[in-house]
Image: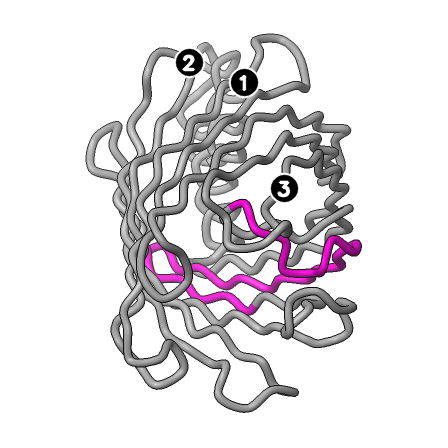
Amino acid sequence: MKLKILLAAAALPLIALPTAAFAQEADVAEAAEEEAGPIEIDFEIGAFSDYRFRGISLSGKDPEITAELAVSHESGLYAAAWVSNVDSDFGGKADEVEVDLTAGFSKDIGPINIDVGGIYYLYPNENGFDYVELYGGITVPVGSASVTVGANWAPSQDSLGNTDNTYVYISGDLPIKDTPVSLHASFGYEDGAFADKKRDWSIGASYDFGSGITATLDYVDTHRAFTNLGDTTAVFSLTKAF
């Protein structure tokens, strides 16, 4: 989209030129669009001071290293694979592996974005931990900010003790005009196999250094967490997108 805008802006001074010049410029723009293609592939790596998932540390409060490969189609369909170290027995070292496989559909309807899909959480070194979760969310602009309301639901399955789990949340993002800084916050409520009416919240800021490098600092807290792994903390992260 940015490339299209730049090409259109570059064509403005050519208004006074002959028709042939317009045709040539249109050919360049069309070639650029064709080169981009209908499929986009993104890759990101990250380092985090803690792996906090809905307010709970899944790394035993140890640092986390992540990698993600995402493929999206112009139709709105997408798929992703995300890998991280994790503490599967809660309270030990983050010496296990978690793999999240995601498939979904994202569509803009006017200014509103709708996103639905499913996630398969895999723990290759552990038996009986894998589970499936469905999700959906709506993002709407509010001035220069955006607000997302969503829900995740894990149906009853053996790995969850034949109990389902529901997580609902609201989150917001506010870019600070003319700066590389953006502010964000979230609040979530979880009940079921993983928590008993647990609430979690976070607030933080991100700094975009350019070239796909982003630094983030978050304050994270929970209420009614089942262990001290939900204690108040600050999480620092550094990510690089390719």
Q: Say if residue 197 shows up in the picture.
A: yes
Rendering coords of residue 85 (x, y %): 71, 67
Residue 231: mark: 3
Q: Indicate which disc, 1 or 3, sits on the residue closer to the N terminus.
A: 1
Q: Indicate which disc, 2 or 1, sits on the residue closer to the N terminus.
A: 2
Measured in 3D between alpha carbons, the distance from the residue under mark 2 to the one under mark 1, in whole angstroms, is 7 Å
- Look at 57% across and 12% down and name the residue there: 176
Rendering coords of residue 118 (x, y %): 34, 66
Q: What is the span of residues highlighted in magenta in the rendered image?
A: 55-81
Residue 144: mark: 2
Chief secondary structure of the magenta span?
strand
Q: Nearer the viewer, mark 1 or mark 3?
A: 3
Measured in 3D between alpha carbons, the distance from the residue under mark 1 to the one under mark 3, in whole angstroms, is 28 Å
Q: Indicate which disc, 2 or 3, sits on the residue closer to the N terminus.
A: 2
Rendering coords of residue 99 (x, y %): 58, 73
Q: Amino acid at mark 3?
A: Asp
Q: Amino acid at mark 2?
A: Ser
Q: Nearer the viewer, mark 2 or mark 3?
A: 3
Residue at the disc numbered 1 = 175
Rendering coords of residue 143 (x, y %): 35, 11
Q: Amino acid at mark 1?
A: Pro
Q: Is residue 222 above or below residue 53?
A: above
Query: How crowded is the residue under tag 3: few (<14 C-alpha within 10 Å), some, or many (20+)?
Result: some
Q: Relative to 36, is 237 on the left or the right?
A: right
Q: Is residue 212 above or below residue 59?
A: above
